[in-house]
Image (spheres, grey):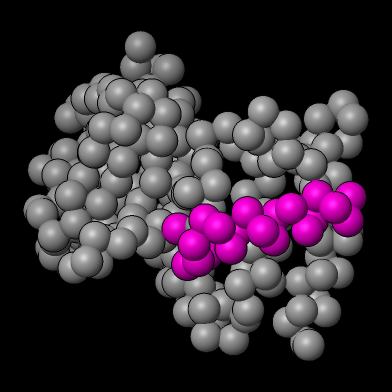
Amino acid sequence: MVSTSVNLLKSVACFAALNTEILECLLVSVKDRSFAKGEVILQEGESCPGLFVIRSGSVKLYRTSWSGDEQIMRVVVTGDCFECAPLFDKGPNPVSAQALEACNTVFIPVAGFEATISKYPEVILQLVPILSMRLRDSLNTIEDFSFRRVPTRIAKLLLQLGERQDKNKQIALPLSLTQHHLASIVGCSRQVLNGYLQELVGDGIIKIENRRIFILSPKRLMELIGSKANG
């Protein structure tokens, strides 16, 4: 069991370079946590309980406005982790987290994480690139909302979320993501999103089967992003 958990942590970018001794120190406090589809894992504004590593499933990280509107900030999938920032600034959760599908996670409580970094401060250096990457992602999101039109944001999102190609060289979006989720990520209504998706279907760039989106021509999608960004 310990070796299995060590291998799982090694598969996560922020822990990949750590030696077995450090990972086993982390595992002293580790707990397995499972969540049903739709279950809220974290609440924005509450104290951060620790770090979650997704063993299976997917989770949406989102913020909610005073009026109840939801903005999805990021979708976290198998082999990724959340929530890092509060572990360093001691602040509240900057986002809420909800399971998009049944999830199994490895949970590292705050106390266990702090005990490990006090003994092995080099762990912090492994997390800095992850936090930097997320800062860049946030800046790119701000740029997209400021300078890119909705159709361009939708096209870019489809490419970002596309999973590996299947035997027919089609790229599929994760099953757990609905059109409601996609609209929330790009900041538009579901009606606007659906209208643009139907245009892409008509142009032969994507297809929609059983409520799932398949990208037929990533190249043409990239061309659309370029032309719409410059137009």
Quadrant of residue 156 in the image?
Answer: bottom right
Q: Measured along the vertical axis of the image, is residue 148 above or below residue 112?
A: below
Residue 165 picture location, percent across and down:
80, 36
State which quarter of the image contains the N terminus: top left
Residue 127 vertical position relative to residue 136 in the rendered view, above or below: above
* Quadrant of the rendered image containing residue 153: bottom right
Up the image or down, 200 lies above or below 6; here it is below
Over which residues does the magenta segment extend?
184-204
Left or right of 217 on screen, residue 213: left
Q: Residue at x 65, y 41 (%)?
A: 173
Q: Is residue 193 magenta?
A: yes
Query: Main structural element of the magenta stretch: helix, strand or loop?
Result: helix
Q: Nearer the viewer, residue 147 or 94?
A: 147
Where is residue 184 shown, x and y percent of the image?
Answer: 45, 58
Locate residue 9, reporting x and y percent: 42, 33
Q: Is residue 20 above or below residue 130?
A: above
Judge by depth and name the residue closer to the eye, 173 or 115.
173
Q: Residue at x 26, y 32 (%)?
A: 39
Q: Nearer the viewer, residue 152 or 44?
A: 152
Extreme top residue here?
1
